[in-house]
Image (spheres, rainbow, N blue to C red):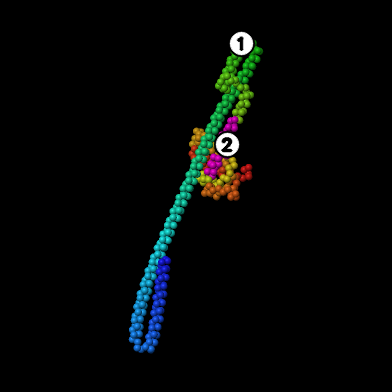
Amino acid sequence: MEETQRAFLIVEKQLSAAQQMTEIFSLENTQLQLFSLETRAKLAVIQEEVQKEMESAMQEVDRMRQEAVENVTTWKKTLHGLREATQKNEQTLQKIREEKEEQELEVQNELELQKEQEMKVKRELEMLQELESQRQMKKELEEKEVKRLQELEQQELEKQRVVEQLQILEKEQQLQQEIEKMREKDRDLMKETSSDSAKSNTVPSDSAERTSTVKRMLACSSKLQDPHPIHQMPSFRVSASFILALMQLVSSAAQDMNSTKPTITEADANMLQVALSNGRTYASDVNVFICALEVESVETQKTMEENANDPHNYDFNSQSGTDYSFCVYGCPVSGKEDVGYCPDKAGCSDAGRYHVVVYSQPKNDILKVTAISRHTESDD
């Protein structure tokens, strides 16, 4: 562009010089005409020479004019060429700009694709981490459930042992009663023998027979109480107190088997969070959706499957599930699509206490929210 401008300046200077020359020539022509008039008036003698000089001057002027015209034409051609070159340069620059813009768009698109891929990878990593945490939580729940089942099995065995001991004590009481009855009969017989001397020979034999029977019953009762014959049979008062203690133990064990009120563990809180944050775990009849801000208490109870084919042959320890009754401080949400997003306590204006029932059966990988109700003052 600078070269083109310089060329334009040169051409303009040349054109101005040509114009000046033309004006000069015009002035000279005028001066020559005046001079010819003056010489024609003063010097008629030298008219022919002046005429010749004028003709030669005119020829020279014409030649100079033709050269100037040719120079102007050449300069116009040069200027036209420079303009065409300038237009070509501008077109080239425009193409370069367009190519640069296309390259910038391609780079921007590639950056956006790269960002999308990074976001996709990040989401996949988050999903994997969430799956891993759920898997870990499931494992902890399974371990907890296995431990609880083992405790229930131990309680069941303890209950059976207590029932067997109660049966033994009942048999022992029956034997004690039989022994007391036979002793009373023996005392009555001894009284009768003192009054009736004629039957004194037969009664001792009957008394001895009854005494041997009593000894056999005592021996049998001692075997029922303790398989080792060295131990002595406890008294009736001790047996009665032992029976009462066993009955209390059985009743407390039965209550513990039906319902427990454990402390809130991290696994329980994680299970509740997983159940509430997944819209697919809500039962069809649940129309209240919340997110838990704080877990206050939990109660658990073993339940039998509703679709059990044979309740008599039902394996309670391996096939049963657990109902977790949580008392939580939570915030209601509009629907299943919003259950995973929970504001803080300050951002929830309608927060309150809720009763949440969650059914869990780790063996069949079942986790379901079966009931949600808001806690009212009448519940207290």
Q: Position of residue 291 (x, y in %)?
A: 56, 46
Q: Position of residue 319 (x, y in %)?
A: 50, 36
Q: Which amino acid is tagged 1?
A: Asn
Residue at left offset 57%, top offset 22%:
226
Task: Name the image quarter holding residue 183.
Answer: top right
Which of 168 and 188 lies nearest the eye of the viewer? 168
Give the spatial CA distance, label 1 vs label 2: 68 Å
Q: Are marks 1 and 2 in contact (CB under 8 Å)?
A: no
Label 2: which residue? 260
Kindly state the secondary structure of the residue where label 1 is placed. Answer: loop
Marks 1, 2: nearer the viewer: 2
Q: Is residue 360 visible?
A: yes
Q: Residues within 10 Å of mark 1 (few under 14, many from 20)?
A: few
Residue at left offset 54%, top offset 42%:
270
Q: Which residues are magenta?
A: 249-276
Total marks in image = 2
Q: Is residue 277 magenta?
A: no
Which of 144 and 6 lies nearest the eye of the viewer? 6
Residue at left offset 56%, top offset 19%:
229
Q: Which image quarter is the N terminus in?
A: bottom left
Which label is found at residue 201?
1
Q: Residues within 10 Å of mark 2 (few under 14, many from 20)?
A: few
Q: Which amino acid is tagged 2?
A: Thr
Residue at left offset 61%, top offset 12%:
204
Task: Name the image quarter holding residue 238.
Answer: top right
Q: In the rendered view, does 25 fall on the left or right side of 212?
A: left
Of callouts 1 and 2, which one flags the residue occurring earlier in the amino acid sequence? 1
Q: Position of residue 287 (x, y in %)?
A: 54, 47
Q: In the rendered view, does 354 fall on the left or right side of 363?
A: right
Q: Position of residue 262 (x, y in %)?
A: 58, 37
Task: Name the image quarter holding residue 77.
Answer: bottom left
